[in-house]
Image: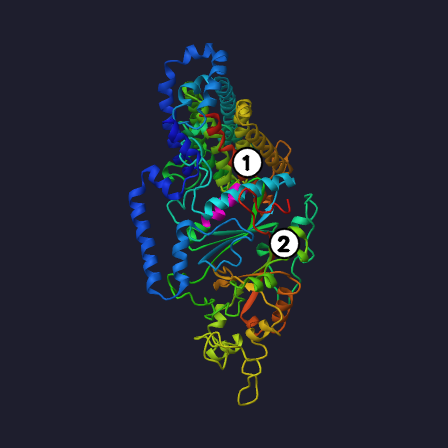
Amino acid sequence: MLSMRKSVTLPAVVMVTSVLLAACGNDGAAVNKVSEKTAVTSEAQTASQDTSKAGQEATAADYSVAVEGYRTFAVEQIDAFVKETEKFTEAVKAGDLEKAKLLYAPARMYYERIEPVAEALGDLDPNIDARDGDVEAADWRGFHRIEKALWADKTTDGMSEYADTLLSDAKLLRAKVETMDIDASLMVTGAVELLNEVSSSKVTGEEERYSHTDLYDFAANVEGAREIYNLLKDDLAAKDKQLNQQIADRFEALEKELAPFKDGDGYVSYEKLKDEDVRKLSQNLDALAEPLSNMGQVLGV
Amino acid sequence: MTENKQDSLKKPLSRREMLKLTGVAGLGLLIGGGGAGGLMALGRKGSSVAAVEPAAADKQGLPFYGKHQAGIITPAQDFICFAAFDVTAGSVEELRRLFRDWTAASAAMASGQMIGEHNTTLNTPPTDTGEAAGLTPSRTTLTFGVGPSLFDGRFGLKGPKPRGLRDLPAFAGDALDPQWCGGDLCVQVCADDMQVAFHAIRNLARIARGHAVLRWTQEGFQRTGRADPAGGTPRNLLGFKDGTGNPDTTDAVLMDRTVWVQPSDGPGWMAGGSYMAVRRVRMRVEVWDRSTLKDQEATFGRHRDSGAPIGSRGEFDPVDLQAKSTDGQPLIPATSHLRLAKGDGSQQILRRSYSYSSGLDPKTGQLDAGLLFISYQRDMDKQFIPIQTRLAKSDKLNEYTVHVGSAVFACFPGCKQGGYIGETLF
């Protein structure tokens, strides 16, 4: 988590810049969406190599359908996240250990699908999702703090306050996403970041070290990346059919690799994975992330 | 950006041009220049050709294209990065594409160029990972082969599986660990700089993503050209010279007889190629260090200091297996490595081994160090296998070594510019 946060600093800055650039033209652009889109596409193609300037003003209009689609998705996910977190925190506060354990991983999936959005919003991500050691011990709160109590200490004692804070952090995320500027660049970077998240902590079983529900996060991160790709794939196919096909195939391969570990509505415990399973999942993940990381250049964002 | 500059961006940049362009050049070039000058000065001081050669090849690199693959009879570089891959590709078309991409990248790296076109584009991950930027080609060679498992029917390959391409038989005393064995493909990268060698393996693994995955890797080293400007026979980690009896790689007739697969040997796709045996041989260095010099010399059949056969003075003195000591025992013991490896002299292999050190064995706290044995031969059954069978049975060295890894690969013939490595098979 911590390392990921550092790496978002850059996109976040880029984003602020594009807020400024996009702000003035935004309203008008939305109306003209369709006609502008065709014009911009051909322009982007001629620009091919020089991506440093080319995209910029075009971006907002060019991918506005995808961007709006993603905003809708993010809001839906965060709405559900707040709702499910509320159920989870209620169970914690009511001292219902077993119920809290059942609700923990499913609630987190909504968050994991849109994690790059949260990461772009300052301290929200560490407050909600920091693992033991990511932050100063005194500042540690959020899901993983409660996870430790539920699975390692086997109690909900003393968790009431953490539960309240977690819910209010979740609600704050919901409020902030409303005014957040999302652009194609954030989406593209976010898709790769989601897979990097999986690669650096979920596939190794470090994310959910007490509950071993890592595969829930794994699946959710991949679903989040898949959503972004789905929204952009037509644009991508128009510019680079081969790359698009490669990404599609490798999503499919990874999903196929993950499928046997499904268990009812959820996933088996990370502890059930053999070394060989982990290696295969990791290799399929790397195979997908590599071409996915070229999407931005091809799209010119 | 002007039209012109854009065009120049499409051409591959040398690592040095790259530095100039990005404006970091000044310091790097000064240091680089000093380094190269230093090497050449060394070459002039020393009398040996070996030390001069690397300096010259440093500038343009060794040719990647040719009748044979480089890295086989090429004088051994200082470092090796070896990797075995498993293929995950589903079709021979995909394999072909992988080898085309590997060939293009390899040719670029052998001549010190950056890989790919996007090394100055800001919104995409650079096509070259960059850690070799500004470095000389360092005599990099990249040598590719295929293992027996590639012929298991997954691919409709054009050429048949060679008779001799199969997993090595179990030799006496083998303690093979699957994590150091086999592989559908292999790449042997050798270079006079470890960072340059690592860069090559890393980039090839990156290009392979989605088509092939790493199965096992091993890095290795020997004394550098700088530490031994005279270019003497390198010593292994037991302190003995290793490779004295290697066939002369400048003798083309001998190479055709011992290393290169001939058209009459079949299959046709291997003509001009060579078979590679790889063994990861762990040395029990702690045990070795407790044995007397006399025992050590009797184990190898050579004097440690000079490398000469026991009873002789010079490293390259003819080996007299009949010589007896005053008590009537052979001077070069019957179980010595030298005597058993030589046999009746009818089998020869080209050894191209490197030492390795992989930290420590967590179980015992002892060093995990030894030899990444690599040999090239025209025919596994007539060369490597009989020699190793003999050694495994009675070599006194076996007390101090244990074979933990094993693999066999058919290394392709070379290819011309415009072609690709493996084209005769795919």
Identify the residue shown where x is 58% and y is 34%. Answer: A250
Magenta portion: prevailing SS class: helix
Residue A123 seen in the figure: no
User: Which mark is nearer the camera, 1 or 2?
Assistant: 2
From the top left corner, tell me how far across and down residue B354 is, in percent: 49, 61
Q: Which of the pair B87/A13 is nearer the observer? A: B87
Residue B421 seen in the figure: yes
From the top left corner, tell me how far across and down residue B317 is, in percent: 49, 77
Q: Quadrant of the C terminus of chain B?
A: top right
B272 with respect to B111 (left or right) = right
From the top left corner, tell me how far across and down residue B9 is, in percent: 41, 34
Point out the stretch of residues depicted in magenta: B198-208
Asked whether residue A172 is drawn in magenta, I would say no
Callout 2: SS: loop
Q: In the image, are marks 1 and 2 on the same chain?
A: no
**B353 lies above or below B125:** below
- Label 1 crowding class (10 Å Cα cut-off): few <14, some 14-19, many 20+? many
**A89 lies above or below B378:** above
- Label 2 crowding class (10 Å Cα cut-off): few <14, some 14-19, many 20+? many
Amino acid type, mark 2 = Ala
Q: How far separated are the C-alphas under marks 1 and 2?
A: 37 Å
Amino acid type, mark 1 = Leu
Chain on which label 2 sits: B
- Residue at numbered disc 2: B271
A17 with respect to A227 (left or right) = left
From the top left corner, tell me how far across and down residue A133 is, in percent: 41, 42
**B81 lies above or below A216:** below
Q: Which of the pair A165/A108 is nearer the observer? A: A108
Q: In the image as oriented, which residue stretches furthest toward the bottom? A: B326
Q: Total label count?
A: 2
Q: Quadrant of the N terminus of chain B?
A: top left
- Residue at numbered disc 1: A288
